[in-house]
Image (cartoon, grey):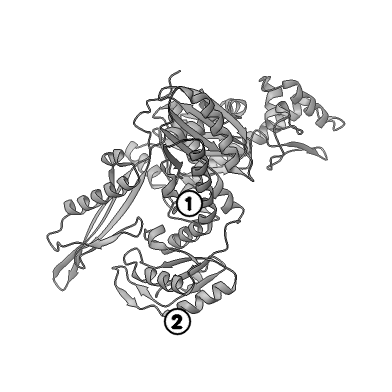
Amino acid sequence: MLIGIDVGGTFTDGVLFDGQAVVTSVKHPTDKQNLKTTLLKVLDDLLTVSTGGGISRIVFSTTLVTNLLATESGDNTALLLLPGPGLPLDTYHLFEHTFFLKGSIDFRGRELEAIDKTEVEKAVGAIKGRGIKKIAVVGKFSNRNSSQEQEVRKIIMKRDPQMEVAIGCETAGQLNFLRRIVTTYYSVMTQSAWEDFAREIEKALAERGIQTAVDVLKADGGTMPLQISRSKPCETVFSGPAASTMGAIALTMNPKNSVVLDIGGTTVDISLLIDGHPLYASKGATIQGHYTHINAFSVRSIPLGGDSPINIDQGNIHVESKRRGAAACFGGDYPTVTDVFNQKYQLGIGQPLKSTKKLTKLIKDTGIDMETLCKAVEDIVFNRIQEAIQKMFTEWENEPAYRVWEVVHGRKFNVQEIIGIGAASKAIVPGLAQRMQIKCRIPEYAAVANALGACVARPTLALKVHIDTQNKVFSIDQDGLSGSISAGRSFQMKDAKELAQHHLMEIAKSRGMEQYAGEAEFYLEEQFNVIRGWETAGKIFDIGVQISPGFIKEYQGVSR
């Protein structure tokens, strides 16, 4: 038995899947002030039904980190940066408590300037004086040589052992200094809250006698063990849109060009499938306007959903962005988008008479009749979604995978269908698809697609290896790993790929996902000669290998 739980903005959904069919599904309102309690309510309901067999895997998709970042309620955090020569320091002043230190590494991993211990201690004193207990240390090119970041951390911990310190080489090991700064900063900012959450979940599972694999869904549509997530909390950001994308693929299993619309109570999440595969954001997830090194689908969210309230102000009809509760047909106090579609198309959702009653009260003494109200709201909703889709297409056209598809196929990309999932999709998607003159599909279990997507998503892992044969060193963009190689000029691409595969397998084993390591694919193979005088003095290799997102081996679709 498999369990998937998705914590959404309005509802938390759960599914119990036996490998072939959805045994049962659960839906509870999300308590944003206590996500753990909501999640455990859903889990307990699912466990009540699963008496016939043991649970072999549980996957959570949660908005905890997304909420912390959106509300800027993470812990106060300081940045210690070692930028070295190059751009003006203002370029890197992205966050309030930023300090710049001496010390630099070049792109080959060679030390150009040593750090100043006294300067580091002085900066730590200033940080402590501001009441800050978390520090992110990031040096340019420290992913090629982490010694200076490691040394700064030792100085900090010796001066103040109570400080929590994260270093860039262990958090975001890829090139691009700005993205590494942002990723490391947000990771340490959210780490305590995420560790508390993970600890409480582990305790709750132990109290229920559950001893099984527990994974968390990541922004790239893959999973990682809950224990590993403690050091990489930011990888769980935007797991909601990732869950909806994976859920849509899981329920359709169709290699088409599709737009996925996850219409919940609070938001509409939009993603794109090219030949049935999700499009990735080539620059990584964007948090608060900053690019990061977090792998993520290319998605867009708009503040519009089935529970968006309707009001009339001085004869003008409005659809509000902020949710005020459930739709009237489900006992809510305000008429919503769902109530309008319920009335217009006689959908029979919930208690339709309550929709009619609230809408009638809304238009009383306004001079607006029911037909006019429904048509106006429908136009507002459709226009907002269409506008968001069009904006996404403008963004998507700049994604490499999108352009490659058009070059390979020799034609422009055309959407073949809209896949509607989420609680409000049945009310909204058919009319929208008709207006856009595109086919639509609302699969069975669309209302809990996110939970199913989390349930059957497989673990993912991607790493890049940089090898410098002249200096006989290599570095990996995962966990700050680096080492030496014995071979010099005899080192070839074949050796570089074997080194990358070896380390991917080792990391996969440490994360309990070795069964998928054999399916890893190379996505980067680059080789450059290092010339000194008239001779080749060495070679530079950059190798990328990954276990791509997909489904666990047991999943072959949902039987009807």
* Position in image of residue 333 (x %, y %): 77, 33
- Report if residue 511 is visible in the image: yes
Are the residues flagged by discs 1 and 2 in contact, CB closer than 8 Å? no
| Mark 1 vs 2, N-terminal side | 2
Q: CA distance from mark 1 to mark 2?
A: 32 Å
- Residue in the image at 50% along x and 48% along y: 199
The type of residue carrying mark 2 is Thr
* Position in image of residue 101 (x %, y %): 45, 76
Please give left or right for residue 150 compared with residue 451 in the image: left
Mark 2 lies on residue: 118
Q: Nearer the viewer, residue 234 or 341?
A: 234
Q: Secondary structure at mark 1?
A: helix
Label 1 neighbourhood size at 10 Å, few (<14), some (14-19), many (20+)? many
* Position in image of residue 379 (x %, y %): 67, 33
Please give left or right for residue 103 compared with residue 241 in the image: left
**Can you tell which quarter of the image residue 155 is in?**
bottom left
Label 2 neighbourhood size at 10 Å, few (<14), some (14-19), many (20+)? few
Mark 1 lies on residue: 233
Q: Secondary structure at mark 2?
A: helix
> Which residue sits furthest right?
365
Q: Nearer the viewer, residue 147 or 492?
A: 147
